[in-house]
Image (cartoon, rainbow, N blue to C red):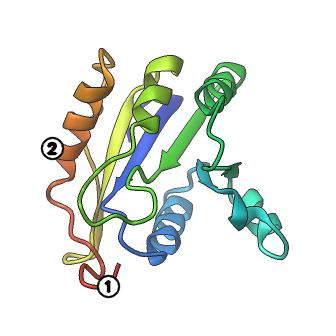
Amino acid sequence: LPNRSKLVLVALPHSSNFDFVLALSVIWGWGLKLNYMGKHTLFKFPHGFFFRAVGGIPVDRRSPQGLIEKMTSEFNSRSSLMLGLAPEGTRNSDGTLKAGFARIAIAANVPVVPVIVDYKTKTLTLGTLITDLSSVESIISAVKEQGQSGHRRAPARL
């Protein structure tokens, strides 16, 4: 990973709930502390304690108002924060990336690192650090370009 105390890590393609297990095992293997945003329903009983303990930050996607400000505040209040997310959200197969991760990076002035998931080779690859935060579109374009080498776990069964 780049020698930075604050990063937005963007995993793609997101094709399976198993992506979380894979990412968690790699993160622990690297000895990293990573926070991630997950849908708020994951944080209810009985699983809530576990997801919070492994760095989860609940997000209610039905009312996303204030999310950018909340995450910017998190970055500003901490000396270090690595925020991981899957911008395809609910495992879309069309390659559409939700723009929230780019908006967070711009607002918090934090670089982005794509994490490419490749089930064909059973690898996770770190992409190149994206420091050009001039626009949401430029960030999404750079992430998509780097993420093209990834392969989904089960493309026919999303």
Q: Give the Cα separation between the discs numbered 2 and 1.
A: 24 Å
Image coordinates of residue 86 in percent, x first then y, are 43, 54
Residue 145 shows which numbered tag?
Answer: 2
Tell me the quadrant of the picture where the C terminus can be found: bottom left
The residue under the point 38% across, 42% down is 1
Q: Is residue 17 visible?
A: yes
Residue 16 located left or right of residue 81: left
Q: Is residue 109 visible?
A: no
Image coordinates of residue 131 in percent, x first then y, are 31, 22
Image coordinates of residue 21 in percent, x first then y, are 52, 74
Q: Earlier in the sequence, mark 2 or mark 1?
A: 2
The residue under the point 39% across, 27% down is 111
The residue under the point 56% across, 55% down is 31
Q: Name the foreground residue: 154 vs 65.
A: 65
Q: Quadrant of residue 80?
A: top right
Proximity of marks 2 and 1: CB atoms separated by less than 8 Å: no
Q: Classify mark 2: helix, strand or loop.
A: helix
- Bin the neighbour count of mark 2 within 10 Å (Cα to Cα): few under 14, some 14-19, many 20 and up: few
Which residue corresponds to mark 1? 157
Q: Name the foreground residue: 64 vs 71.
A: 64
- Residue lying furthest front in this view? 62
Mark 1 is on which residue type?
A: Arg
Image coordinates of residue 101 in percent, x first then y, are 45, 37
Q: Name the foreground residue: 14 vs 32.
A: 14
Q: Quadrant of residue 89?
A: bottom left
Residue 70 located left or right of residue 50: left
The residue under the point 21% across, 63% down is 150
Residue 67 shows which numbered tag?
Answer: none
- Bin the neighbour count of mark 1 within 10 Å (Cα to Cα): few under 14, some 14-19, many 20 and up: few
- In the rendered view, would you say 53 is above or below 151? above
Dot in front, 2 or 1 = 1
